[in-house]
């Protein structure tokens, strides 16, 4: 493609600056072919049907606008994001609007820095870019200095001359990966501008606009708009729920939405619900996001191909980061902490922190909150698939073991804090109960998912032990669905391990959770099974606990006589064991069951005995509850 001569426009200016953006996701960008870079005078076409990005677009235009106030000092405004998020599309829209406003007129130049190509040798250096920009500005080959440094010097001289003539320049440098590629191209004159597209957050001093995936409404809007490109398509209006589902399954990523729209345009009779169902299979989703077409460089127009460019960049330049990238999908929950990532990799935390930060700068990870890292759903699928082949070299199975045991050990320490009585020694992993609760709150999704993953990977020991460390916390948070999930798995895992005691504990906890969600018949069965297991093991305490819980479930289905018997048996066991706290709980529940059938005298005796137990254990909370029950029962006995 031949370069046109320079075009000029007069424009006022504030301070020079750089805006860093990224790759195109919603428009075909005309770029030079062949290994040599080639600058274009002018811009590729702006994307058709551009949707959203209002705030980000305003920020870029404020930077480009010569009448704007800009920012003080040397300004670098960075817009960065993951592959396929639409960074170049946004840049082109902003640059074309700037031209429409007459801010640069015809003094606009475009060059592809080709950093994200499979061949590292195709990456364009700053000196090579300067030479091509000079040619696009009208400098003849015979007038170019022989060395790259000299060409950079001439580039700056030309910009200085144009500034003196009132001819400001906008240079768009597409697909840069490192600051060294573009920093020498930064104009020294305040009337010029340099826009950089990159998947990385470069280390140039910058006002950062981090381009995330589209909000749900904009993603749906983009899919509808792209679906109707070139022809009316009634499917989006007729199938609103599948449209929203497809947008979610695309991860609200513009490139994915454009590809799916192109595929659907090619099959105008295909129901959107059918496409949504195909994409619902996570293992097939990346295959579905392939247009079957190729770009001008012969690369597949597919989400996987876009991710390949970022991944290959890692493999060549940062193999240890590539290994971490492949291993992070092993974490079962939505995000991961630094200690968990360190356990996963068996590397020191400072090393892992640097690697996580680098992956975040490359927009292969996001940081939902400080100290935690997550992956976009499609990136996670991609990374996980790339972890299969090198699984042995990466020691993937051992990494998963380390991660799950980290969650088990830390949950055990946190649970100790939750159950500790005043003055009782506790692990120093947490500063106290509040700290332990905060950790549980943050890791809850990971912990529950870890139990499910342990079951799915036949790690029955973890699936059996971890739920026992979660029960107190989940009960306190009233996370009943999670309680049902982890204790159902725990009961199954204990059976497979032949651990009868673990099975009894899991059934007891499961029964309590079932009762709390009012699935009483299932609760009674689980608790009866638990109460049957414990005597065979000689575990009187477990038997008493199961009987007490069984009595509560029986009372709630109005089987009062059976409930009374269960509570009496539980109280007898506790008394024989000298466990005054459990005795007090059983007597309290016994009193409640007796009240239900108006045996007030016996209920009062039970409540008074329970109160004496809590007086002894100094359990003020339980003592207050039983006192309230006693007062109410005496009132009812008196006919009040």
Image (spheres, grey):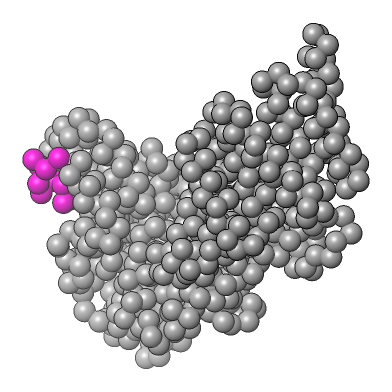
Q: Is residue 289 visible?
A: yes
In the displayed orientation, state which residue is furthest to the bottom.
146
311 and 202: which one is in front? 311
Q: Which residues are magenta?
A: 262-271
Quarter of the C terminus within the rendering: top right
Res 379 → quadrant: bottom left
Which percent across, then down, holds residue 274? 17, 44
Q: Is residue 185 visible?
A: no
- The image shows residue 508, relative to residue 366, as above or below, that is above
Which percent across, then down, holds residue 508? 58, 50
Which percent across, then down, holds residue 181? 45, 77
- The image shows residue 612, relative to residue 251, as above or below, that is above
- Residue 487 part of the magenta-drawn span: no
Residue at 40% in and 41% down: 216
Residue at 72% in and 50% down: 573
Residue at 76% in and 63% down: 430
350 and 294: which one is in front? 350
Judge from the rendering whether residue 580 lies leftward or rightward of residue 107; answer left or right: right
In the displayed orientation, state which residue is furthest to the top.
639
Res 15 → quadrant: bottom right
Judge from the rendering whether residue 456 lies leftward or rightward of residue 233; answer left or right: right
- Residue 263 part of the magenta-drawn span: yes
Which percent across, then down, holds residue 169? 42, 61
Judge from the rendering whether residue 493 lies leftward or rightward of residue 633; answer left or right: left
- The image shows residue 350, relative to residue 456, as above or below, that is below
Residue at 17% in and 35% down: 235
Quarter of the N terminus within the rendering: bottom left
């Amino acid at each position: 493609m031949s370069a046109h001569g320079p075009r000029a426009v007069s424009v006022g200016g504030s301070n020079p600056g750089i805006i860093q953006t990224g790759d195109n996701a919603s428009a075909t960008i005309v770029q030079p072919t062949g290994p040599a870079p080639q600058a274009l005078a002018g811009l590729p076409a702006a994307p058709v049907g551009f949707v959203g990005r209002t705030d980000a677009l305003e920020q870029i235009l404020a930077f480009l606008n010569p009448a704007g106030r800009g920012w003080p000092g040397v300004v670098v405004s960075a817009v960065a994001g993951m592959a396929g998020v639409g960074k170049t599309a946004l840049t082109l829209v902003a640059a074309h609007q700037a031209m429409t406003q007459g801010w640069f007129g015809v003094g606009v130049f475009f060059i592809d820095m080709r950093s994200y190509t499979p061949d590292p040798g195709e990456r364009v250096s700053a000196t090579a870019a300067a030479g091509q920009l000079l040619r696009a500005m009208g400098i003849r080959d015979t007038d170019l200095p022989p060395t790259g440094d000299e060409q950079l010097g001439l580039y700056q001289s030309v910009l200085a001359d144009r500034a003196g003539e009132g001819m400001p320049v906008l240079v768009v440098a597409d697909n840069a990966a490192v600051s060294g590629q573009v920093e020498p191209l930064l104009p020294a004159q305040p009337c010029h501008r340099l826009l950089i597209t990159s998947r990385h957050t470069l280390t140039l001093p910058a006002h950062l606009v981090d381009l995330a995936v589209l909000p749900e409404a904009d993603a749906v809007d983009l899919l509808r708009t792209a679906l109707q490109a070139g022809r009316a398509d009634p499917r989006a209006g007729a199938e609103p729920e599948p449209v929203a589902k497809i947008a979610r399954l695309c991860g609200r990523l513009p490139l994915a939405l454009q590809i799916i729209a192109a595929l659907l345009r090619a099959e105008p009779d295909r129901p959107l619900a059918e496409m949504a169902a195909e994409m619902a299979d996570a293992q097939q989703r990346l295959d579905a996001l392939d247009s079957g077409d190729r770009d001008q460089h012969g690369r597949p127009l597919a989400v996987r191909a876009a991710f390949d460019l970022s991944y290959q960049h890692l493999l060549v330049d940062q193999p240890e980061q590539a290994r971490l990238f492949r291993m992070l999908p092993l974490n079962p929950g939505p995000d991961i902490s630094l200690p968990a990532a360190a356990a996963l990799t068996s590397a020191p935390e400072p090393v892992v922190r640097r690697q996580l930060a680098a992956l975040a700068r490359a927009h292969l990870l996001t940081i939902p909150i400080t100290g935690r890292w997550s992956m976009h759903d499609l990136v996670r699928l991609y990374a996980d698939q790339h972890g299969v082949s090198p699984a042995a070299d990466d020691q993937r199975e051992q990494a998963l073991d380390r991660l799950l045991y980290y969650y088990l050990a830390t949950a055990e320490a946190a649970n100790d804090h939750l159950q500790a009585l005043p003055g009782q020694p506790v692990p120093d992993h947490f500063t106290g109960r509040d700290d332990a609760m905060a950790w549980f709150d943050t890791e809850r999704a990971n912990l529950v998912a870890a139990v499910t993953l342990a079951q799915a990977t036949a790690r029955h020991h973890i699936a059996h032990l971890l739920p026992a460390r979660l029960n107190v916390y989940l009960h306190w948070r009233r996370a009943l669905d999670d309680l049902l999930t982890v204790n159902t798995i725990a009961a199954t895992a204990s059976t497979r391990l032949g651990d009868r005691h673990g099975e009894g504990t899991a059934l007891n906890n499961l029964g309590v959770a079932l009762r709390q969600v009012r699935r009483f018949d299932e609760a009674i069965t689980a608790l009866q099974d638990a109460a049957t297991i414990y005597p065979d093991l000689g575990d009187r305490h477990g038997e008493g606990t199961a009987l007490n819980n069984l009595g509560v479930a029986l009372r709630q289905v109005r089987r009062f006589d059976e409930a009374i018997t269960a509570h009496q048996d539980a109280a007898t066991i506790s008394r024989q064991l000298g466990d005054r706290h459990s005795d007090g709980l059983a007597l309290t529940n016994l009193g409640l069951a007796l009240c239900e059938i108006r045996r007030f005298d016996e209920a009062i005796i039970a409540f008074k005995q329970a109160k004496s137990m809590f007086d002894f254990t100094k359990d003020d909370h339980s003592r207050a509850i039983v006192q309230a029950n006693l007062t109410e029962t005496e009132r009812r006995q008196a006919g009040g």
